[in-house]
Image: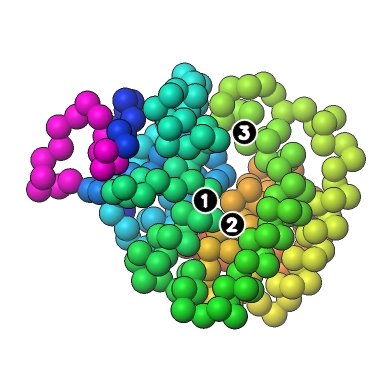
Amino acid sequence: MTCVALAFPLTSRQGGRPLGRSTPDSWRIDMQIYWIKAQAPRRVLALVKHLGIEAECIEVDLKRGEMRTPRYAALNPNMKAPTLVDGDLVLWESSAIMAYLCIKAGSDMWPARDPGEQVDMLRWLSWNDCHWSEAVAPYYFEHIVKPTFDIGAPDRAALQGVAGALKKYASVLDGHLAGRSHVACGRLTIADFQLASMAAYWQESEMPLDAFPNVVGWLDGLMRIPAWADPWPA
């Protein structure tokens, strides 16, 4: 992965090139990925690193409000990250970005040629967004997001009453992972990165996952992948 440290101003919409800098043609990279240090960009950056994709990884300063600037909002009207720019293509939402990167790289981490596997993947991506993500997010927010962006100390009282939902869906995932090392398709896919992006911090976030050995074993296995263990650009 090639990550060139860039600051604002952000890209123009004309060809997706960064504004206000001179880039030698000999090392010009067409793809940019805008990111912050959070769980959704982690999925994309890990995939970029794992697949060896050439991209400029541009950190957006959330504390300075750079995601709310008109230029960034023109790329991503949600004013969130990640956002991918590849030539004239502008894409947001991490699962869509990951599928695009796999297609571009020819990786079966997104099964572009197998409709049956696509349906299996979509099931777990949807399950994550509708159930699992909502269950793990309160722990991730209190223990990871708050210290990362200096927005206060963890409020453990706010987590009272949310453990039931986490255990409910952890039980579903734990049962599914019995005898399996990956979530979908019998191999590493973007579904693993999607489901693990917050749960990877389960110990730091004090998520009650100790009673779910298959989930913990799956998370431990992902941490043995170098790009997942250390996805952040230098």
Can residue 72 be seen here?
yes
Disc 1 to disc 2, how far (Cα)?
8 Å
Q: Seen from this angle, which residue lies furthest top?
A: 64
Mark 1 element type: helix
User: Label 2, on which residue?
Assistant: 194
Point out the stretch of residues depicted in magenta. Answer: 14-28
Q: Earlier in the sequence, mark 3 or mark 1?
A: 1
Report the disc number at residue 94.
1
Q: Could you tell me residue 153's position as x and y percent? A: 69, 24
> Residue 27 magenta-drawn?
yes
Callout 1 amino acid: Ser
**What residue sits right under mark 3 in the picture?**
145
Q: Is residue 76 above or below residue 92?
A: above
Q: Is residue 78 above or below residue 96?
A: above
- Check disc 3: other Cα within 10 Å, few if <14, some if 14-19, many if 20+: many
Instruction: Locate residue 133, reporting x and y percent.
Output: 70, 50
Could you classify mark 2 by the number of other residues whose Cα lies within 10 Å: few (under 14), some (14-19), or many (20 or more)?
A: many
Confirm or deny contact between disc 1 and disc 2 (CB under 8 A): yes
